[in-house]
Image (cartoon, helix red, strand yellow):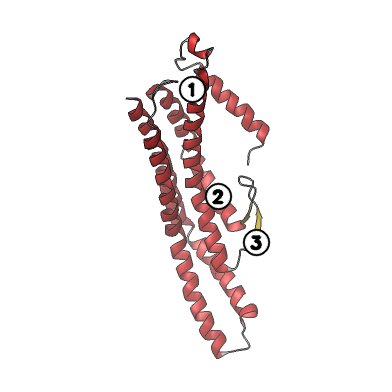
Amino acid sequence: MVPLQVRIVFSFGIGIWVLNNIKLPKWEILVSSDLIPIILQEVFIGLTCGMTLSICFGTVILAGEKIAATSGLAFASQVDPTSGAQSPVISQIFSLFLLILFFSMNGHLIIFELLFASYKGIPIGGAVDYMNMIEEALSSAGFLFRTAVIIVLPIVSILFFMNIGIGFITKSAPQLNLFSFGFPMTILGTFFALYFSVDALQFVFAELINNALSIVKSVLEGIDDGGK
């Protein structure tokens, strides 16, 4: 959601801040061909942690898509600025809700702390256990589907029983067909279910953020163990 120019400047600012607080390799390494593997290693570590956070935060997008598909709100979609694809409005609301909780819990400060601690745990150019790091990162995929089911299941269950009731009503009164009665009732029921689920969703989202930060920490600890 942040413009590309701001992200580039912000990345350079973080890089300069880290550069002034870490121990660099010897000058002979920096001017030789050994610098290329070091750069690729640092890029790989950053991509792994970024992918882990992206997968964890994609949980709410997946949950919103399933709720929208069940309730008939899938037509109300817009372009997701993070992925560039069409996503339901419910997914966008969930994503903004999660982002607000992330900043309110100082998640961005924890990420900066973990980023700086990773350079202390393993210096630039040190040995890295790539297999351990990849396994820790891929474990977040199962976490995504598990948490998405926890978010979706209560609301989808309510909609399931509503659809059963609507089916009985439309069967007994054929003039109340699906388009004139079923869809409005389903959409209205979805709004009420989401409204009364806000308190419960904030605890689920807070747990999601804590688990996402724990996964990133475990990935960096796996790097540290590999360095040892």
Which amino acid is tagged 3?
Ala
Q: SS for tag 1?
A: helix
- Ranked by sequence position, the earlier of labels 2 and 3 is 3
Q: CA distance from mark 2 to mark 3?
A: 16 Å
- Ranked by sequence position, the earlier of labels 2 and 1 is 1
Crowd class of label 2 (few under 14; some 14 to 19; many from 20; radius 10 Å) = many
- The structure residue drawn at horizontal position 42% and vertical position 58%, both measured from the top left corner, is 150
Quadrant in which the C terminus appears: top left
- The structure residue drawn at horizontal position 65% and vertical position 79%, both measured from the top left corner, is 180
Q: Is residue 147 above or below residue 75?
A: above
Q: Please give the label number shown on residue 15.
A: none
Q: CA distance from mark 2 to mark 1?
A: 35 Å
| Residue 121 point in image, percent of width and height | 38, 24
Q: Is residue 76 above or below residue 54?
A: below
Q: Please give the label number shown on residue 95.
A: 2
Q: Please give the label number shown on residue 38.
A: 1
Q: Are marks 2 and 1 in contact (CB under 8 Å)?
A: no
Tag 3 residue: 76
State left or right for residue 192 relative to residue 137: right
The mark lying in front, picked from 2 and 1, is: 1
Q: SS for tag 2?
A: helix
